[in-house]
Image (cartoon, helix red, strand yellow):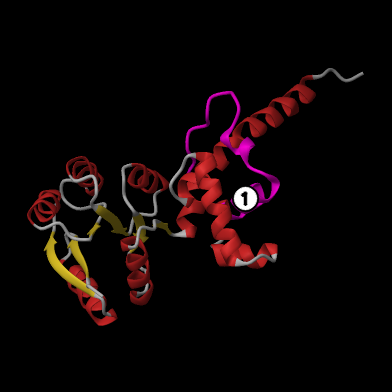
Amino acid sequence: MDSIRVAIVDDHPLFRAGVTQSLLESGGFEVIAQGGSRDDALRVVGDRPPDILLLDVSIPGGGLDALNAIVTRHPGQKVVMLTVSESGGDVARAMRGGARGYVLKGVEAGSLATILANIAAGERYVSPALSARLLSDGAEPQADGRSPVDALDERQRRILDLVSAGLSNKEIAIELDLHEKTIKHQMTRIFSKLAVSNRTEAAMVFRDSLQPTAHSAAAAADSRRAEPRG
């Protein structure tokens, strides 16, 4: 099996060296290029496109700006944000901007290798904890009207509720007493019905669907408080 070719763009040379060493020790990876800025990221992808580009959010020139430029010029390039930023806004911009994954720098070496192998195989990844944080940071509520969540059946709504709480497929399977394969199948159907491509986007749609209910409840409470007492 061919090695997965990885490029690392981060403005801390020692961090790049550490990631390089951990990937090489994991086996199945080849680090073919490194850089420390937005311009470096564009050069690396232009000169010799890697299978996966690891990109920090806070590099000089902006990691998210680099992502947008790379995805525009090289639509098939897989980009994974590897960063310390836990901002829901950064996660949302990255995943909506075309990143295939969003990983925190504290990830264990073995876990990073597994995540990258899965992304190379076509999957997407966002830490479940970051998916939950994205909900608390909040996306803008949808306009009035029918929510895409209305198309989900009761089981799919329950699964999406647990996804929004940060649970993994395995944890959801245990919670609902189902096989993990069943959860994966249901997640695929949920993505299709919501027209999203990953768990984070699905969780955002679910969170937005709750907004009208929350607003209505608040309005009802205000109305009750305003009623004159006899």
Give the quarter of the figure containing the C terminus.
top right
Q: Is residue 165 above or below residue 116?
A: above
Q: Which residue is drawn at the image coordinates 15% and 56% (left, top)?
A: 49
Q: Position of residue 144 (x, y in %)?
A: 58, 23
Name the foreground residue: 223 vs 19.
19
Q: Amino acid at mark 1?
A: Asp
Q: Is residue 193 above or below residue 57?
A: above
Give the quarter of the figure containing the N terminus.
bottom left
* Range covered by the magenta-colored residues: 137-163
Q: Viewed as shown, does residue 108 lie left or right of 191?
A: left
Q: Is residue 136 visible?
A: no
Q: Which residue is drawn at the image coordinates 13% and 67% (left, top)?
A: 32
Q: Position of residue 128 (x, y in %)?
A: 49, 59
Q: Is residue 15 above or below residue 191?
A: below
Q: Which residue is drawn at the image coordinates 13% and 58% (left, top)?
A: 36
Taking the magenta stretch, the answer to whether it contains residue 225 is no
Q: Position of residue 80 (x, y in %)?
A: 29, 57
Taking the magenta stretch, the answer to whether it contains residue 147 is yes
Q: Is residue 35 above or below residue 113?
A: above
